Structure formats: C-alpha cells, structure tokens
Image: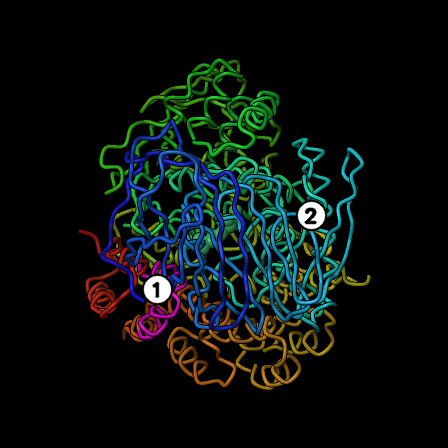
Amino acid sequence: MRDAAPQTIYLSDYTAFGWRVEQVSLHFTLAPSATRVRSRIAFAPNADAPAQPFFLHGEALTLISARIDGQDITPDVTAEGLTCTVPDSAFVFEAEVEIDPAGNTALEGLYMSNGMYCTQCEAEGFRKITYYPDRPDVMAVFDVTIEGDLPVLLSNGNPVSTAQGRAEWHDPWPKPAYLFALVAGDLVAHPGSFTTRSGREVALNLYVRPGDEGKCAFGMQALKDSMKWDEDVYAREYDLDLFNIVAVDDFNMGAMENKGLNIFNSSAVLASPETSTDMNFERIEAIIAHEYFHNWTGNRITCRDWFQLCLKEGLTVFRDSQFTADMRSAPVKRISDVIDLRARQFPEDQGPLAHPVRPDRFQEINNFYTATVYEKGAEVIRMLKTLVGDEAYAQAVQLYFDRHDGDAATIEDWLKVFEETTGRDLAQFKRWYTQAGTPRVSVAEDWADGTLTLTFTQSTAPSAASPDPQPQVIPIAVGLIAPDGAEVATTRVLEMTEATQRFAFDGLAQRPVASILRDFSAPVVLDHPDADPAHLLAHDTDPFTRWEAARTLARRSLLAQIRDGAAPDEAYLDGIHRVATDRSLDPATRALMMGAPGQSELAGVLAEHGETPDPMAIHAALEDMRAAMAARFGGDAMMLYAENTVTEAYAPDAAQSGQRALAGVMLSLMTRGDNGTAAQAQFDHADNMTQKLGALAQLITAGRGDAALAAFEDRWRDDRLVMDKWFGLQVARAQPDDAADVAQRLTAHPDFNWQNPNRFRAVFGTLAMHHAGFHHASGKGYALLADWLIKLDPLNPQTTARMCSAFQTWKRYDTERQKLMKTQIDRILATPGLSRDTTEMLTRIAGA
Ligand code: ARG
Ligand code: ZN
C-alpha cells in the first residue's frame, strides 16, 4: 500500500481531539500473516475540544467488523482511517481488524523479526495495528490479551495472568498509543531485580533470542545503574512491578521507551568483551539509560503533539549525557558530544534540512527524529541550566514533574516552570526552540590599561526555515590565562543577548590569553582570530577549550595544507607530541586530543568560507598530517603503546577504554613505519573486540588485511552484530578510489541481508560517511547509494529517508559533483510510488 499525496501538518493548526479515551482493551490472536486484533475503546466527549467529525487513524488494516455500543456499524474507510457518526454522550467503540505482521517490512506497527513478533509504534505506527486516535495527547489505560503459540507473550505494564499460549497485561498508567508494545516469541530472559528507594521490589528482565544469553550482563547492570541514578539525581522512582527490555535484530532506530517494555535494536543492548568494542559498551550504557529515563521524561509526561518532540528527546538526551558524565569522565563525554554535534547536527543546521529544535511543520514526522531535535535540543537544556544555575535548574525540573505528571505537555509548559522558578523572562531564550541555524559568534580583543575588552558579534545565516533570524541568548563561558600559564580569571559566564556586545575584564597586570566558550557553553561556531591556541593547548585549565585548542591548530594546519599546499604545521605537531606524552593527562583525553577534524567537517568549514571543498585534497591533507605525526612521534609511539597496554582482565570501564583508545592511536602511527607488524601481533593475540577490530583496521590500511579479514569472517560468520562490523570496516578503510567498489562487492556477499537495517547501514551508511569515497569524482558512490535507496524505499521508507541525508551537503561541492548528485536525487524522486518519507527528504534537500 502506498502513501497518499503528501500533506503538510502545521503546529499552528493544533486542535484537541473531540473525545477522551477512558479505557482500551485489545485482544490479539497472533498468526504471521493474519493476526486478528479486537479492540474495545471507551470514548467520552471532550468538552474542551472544538466540534469535529469522529475520525480514527488506521492504515493497512482489513476491517472485519465495527460496533458502537454493541450495534454493528458501517464506517467510511479510507487509506488513512475511519469516520462514523457517534452518540453525543459516552460510548463504546469496538472493532476487529486483520493485519499482516510477516509482510510488514517497514518495521513500523506489528512486524516479525526472526520469527518473533514485535512492535514499533512511535511516532505513528499504532494506526497500523488498529483503528485509534493515534496522537500523543490522547492518553488511556490499556488492557491487553495476547493469544499465540509462543513461549513468551509480553505487553506493557504488569502481568495479570499467564498461561500456555495466552497472557493478559494491565498497564495502570494512562499512556498515548505510541508507547504501546507487544512482543511474542521464543525468547530467554536474563533476570535481575531492583529495589527502589521507597523499598519496592522491581523485577527486571532482558529478553533475548536463545544463544544471546551471554551478552546480557552488561545491559542489566546499566539498567540498574540508570534506575539508581535517576533516583539520586532527579528523584525519579520507577512505577511498575516489572521492567522488561527485549532485543530485536530488525529495528529502524536505536531503541524505544514503550512503557515497561522497552524494545531495543540488538546492537544497542547486546554486549560482550569478545564481540563489542569499548565504544559499543559506552553507547549501550547510554541508550539503556536514555530509554529508562524516558519513563519520566516522555512517558509520565509526554508530548502534546509531535512538534514538541524535543520536549522529551532533548531533555532525555541531556539526562543521559549527565549520566554518562557521572559514570565515566565528564570532560571526555563533553568533548565526544561536541565532536558528534559538529559531525551530525551542524551540517543539518547549515544546509537545506535546517529546522528549529521545535519544527513548525512536517509532512512525515519520522523525518524529524534528527540531530537537531535530539542533540541540539539537549544543548538548549544545558544552556538553560548554565544560565539559571544548578539549584534553580533542579527546582524548576521538580516543579515540571509535579505540575505536569500525567500531561501531554508543550515547550511553553517547560519554559514556564523555569520562568516561575527564577523570575526570568525566557521569551528571547525561546528562540533556541523556534529558530533554525547555528549562530556564528565572532570575538575581537582589545587591550588597554590593564583591561581586556572582548567584543562579541553574533549572526545566524538565514535559511528556508528561518529567513530572518534574530539575536539569541548565548551563554559564553570565559577564563583568562596569563603568559606564564597561570589562570588569572576563573570561568565566568557572559550572557550575550544583543547582536553585538562588549565585556571587560579589568585590573590585569599583563595581557592574558582568553579561553572562550569553555565547556562548549553554547552550540555555536566561534570565530576568534586573536586566539592563541598553542598557549591554551599548553596551559588551559578547562578540558574542553584545551582540547579545542588542539583542534584549532589541527584545523588551521589542514586548511593551509589544502589551500596552499603548506606542510603540516610544526607548532601543532610539537604541541600534540607534548600533550600525548603528558602523563598528568588521562589517556582518554590524550587520545581525543590527537584526533583530527573529519574530512566532512573540513569540507563544511571551507564551504562556510565560500570556498569549494575538494574531497581528494582534504583526504590527502589528512594523510600528510598523519604521516608527519608518525614521523614526529618516532619511537615514542611504541613507548606509549606499551605504556597503555592493559594487562588486567578486560573491563569496559572509562579507565581501560581510555588506555586502549590511546594505544589504538599509537598503533595507527606505528603501522605507518612497520607495515602492520605490530597490528598483526595485536590481531593475533587480542582477547577483546576493541583491539581485534583496531588491529584489523590497521592491517587493511597497511594493505595486508585479506588474511585477517578471512579469519575474522570465519570466526564470526554466525554473529550478526560482529559481521556488521566486518562489512562496515571494509568500506570505512577502503581507499577513496575503491570505496564504492568495495561496497558494491559486499552487496553480493551471501550475508548481505539488505532488508536488515543494521546490515544495510553497515555498508551504505559507512559509504556515505567515507567522504572521499562517496564523493569520488566519477559519481559512482552517488549512483550506487541511489540504486539501493530506490530498492529499499518500497520496503522500508523510514530507513531509506534517513539515509538520504547523505546528499544534504550537495551544494557545497563543485558544479560537476553538484550535477552528479542532483541527477541521483532527481532519479530517486522520479521513482513511481516513492514513499512520503523519502519524497519529503529529497524535496527539501533539492531545495525550492
Ligand atoms: N523515542 C525513541 C528514542 O529516542 C526513538 C524512536 C523513534 N522511532 C521512529 N520510528 N521515529 O529513544
Ligand atoms: Zn529518546
């Protein structure tokens, strides 16, 4: 079934639903291609809503029968739903529908994955299960009965009864339909338990397919840590007797916070040292926390409409970032988040897909689960906390929980608790939610008579979403470092509200070096021509700005190399060598400092300056930089490698991960000199995936990866998650000329199951991120991706549409590449029956 003609939905058109739902009973009789769903829904008129026809969403449903108050009715049914006449007072609507989980390749609604039934209803998937007002502001208590010949039958809430082939569930907490979940399959439970601070015992289960039992312990611990942390830091306690997590192999996103029954992409929960990298462990811990934290920020308080998505996502991402900072290293987490923001959110904000953190229109809401809504949404909350202070933040959030528990709320509600708590007017701050684009902040320094004056100017480029951007409230954290390296002014937060604004620091004996935007206090691009990054790299006390100083030096060197063919900057190489051998810095921070900006980030910087990035020149500059670094380090690389080799048993904690990260950077330097000898030794002896994969990457780079790749495949061919890494790594490490060919060759591999989103992304997501390979001058990268997006779209529009963002930067490049990309965009758009998801994405990318 195809989507109807695209229709734009506007925030300004919001109206309440005309009825309240008092109670919902659902009865499922499971069968792979003919599942029957019987519903009984008690409606009562909503006096607060305008008069409207009675309409229930419903898509891809076969209506068997419908009744109102026991009388058969014949509703008007369209591809979008059902309309019928209803009584003026309360009534009971009943329906029976048939659906086809086995034929559901879109992985939205009720579908099957490896013989197991599962659901994904956010945002608008419940309408593919039965007729219902599928909107987040309609909340109801659900009772669910599942009949099916499978050992495990799960739904939300608490179990009422379980028998062979039949289970009944009751969820006492009113919830919107997008939080509904059902799972049925041959699953095994990894059990656990948690005692809440008020002494209630909660049973925990991590359900997995037989064979995956050994990959559950870490996730279970992460869940317990999250439950404890949310009690300690946000005073939030869990509210059911049971909390279940299920791992599913076929899943469009990372995970889903369904009430009491979280469903996870198996890549976001299954972990073991032999099969998962340090980065996998950290990500899994964060996602488990994220979904758990949604129980309050998302479930108990949900969103009035999907425009308010950031209300739950921005806040929950911010909360999970605080959790990770507490569990691991706060500076390392902050720096990693900024790297991620620049890689994923800045291109969005600076290109044709730019949209506000709270968008005001959409065609397909699934296209707005973006880095802007999630990650920039979290940055906005971080700024709010910086501006009002920790104590007021805590008070305002508690007020939010007290006042809005059980509500479907808005950003206005959220800001109001801060205004009431602090007495501040947040009207201007609200622009962070309503205005698209990344502000650029320039700072000029003026030194006279012991006073340093900083003049800040902010501007945001106009975009289709925000043609006339206004000045934002920008918290700018500043400290001052004296020429001898001493900190003469500790961090002070300047609050910028005007287009141009001056701040003075007086009583200074000597002209200091300004350390600006400490801790990345606002999601802006900073332009500071008077900066002295070499001094800050040596002496800054703020871990973020110290890291940023290394980044600035690297960026300057790379830009000079690209623009003028300059050699890698000696001052940078000196500084980075000194930092790498500075044992007073933890290994994780040193590893981060050695990272150079990515190729795509450099292309973005050039484009911002009105220059046309040449992907091959960018690639070559980074290669030269790494070669120069290897030369500069010489034997120190091997010394640092040895020094950071972990001898204790593997643990995925921050300390060990940091050591392995630094050793991994050193291995990459060593490989330039030894043609992979050290990498081969590491590959042969490693007992964990972090080091195996790190060594394999180096062997491929050294041109001697074939034997190791074959051995790796042999060892892991039955493990999907590990094989995803095998597929991805070959594309990631391919030479620019070969990347598209390697990807194409891998699509012929018998295990290239392209309908599995993880596998599809392992090949094509990686190709899209291989800057020089994807942007190969021949256009073969573009054409290959387009071929496969056209193939995937009719089966899985969501994953197809998300991957279209590979083309979002097309206007940055030379006219030849622009033409090649535009040809592919137009070719996809011309595909008959293209989904609403992909049509919207590509239409926005192509521009008006
Ligand atoms: N609410 C989920 C999370 O952030 C994401 C689910 C989005 N799914 C979708 N199909 N758009 O944890
Ligand atoms: Zn979320």
Task: Kindly identify the residue that appears in the image at 49 percent across and 14 percent down.
Answer: 506
Label 2 or label 1, whichever lies nearer to me, is 2
Measured Cα–Cα span from mark 2 to mark 1: 34 Å
Q: Residue 692 carries which label?
A: none
Tell me where residue 617 appears, x and y as whole percent.
35, 64
Q: Name the residue rendered at 26%, 56% in the picture.
A: 612
Left or right position of 334 against 615: right
Q: Is residue 33 left or right of residue 395?
A: left
Residue identified by numbered label 2? 586
Q: Most prominent secondary structure in the magenta stretch?
A: helix
- The one nearer the camera, 222 or 797, is 797
Q: What residue type is labelled 2?
A: Asp
Q: Quadrant of the N terminus?
A: bottom left
- Residue 89, image quadrant: top left
**For residue 270, above or below residue 416:** below
388 over 848 or under it: above or below: above
The circle drawn on residue 617 is 1
Question: x, y percentage for residue 774?
Answer: 36, 69
Residue 769 included in the magenta stretch of the image: no
| SS assignment at label 1 | helix
Report the side of 703 relative to 500 (left or right): right
Amino acid at circle 1: Ala
Q: Which of the 4 quarters of the picture holds residue 429?
A: top left
Magenta residues, start to end: 787-808
> Left or right of 197: which side holds 392?
left
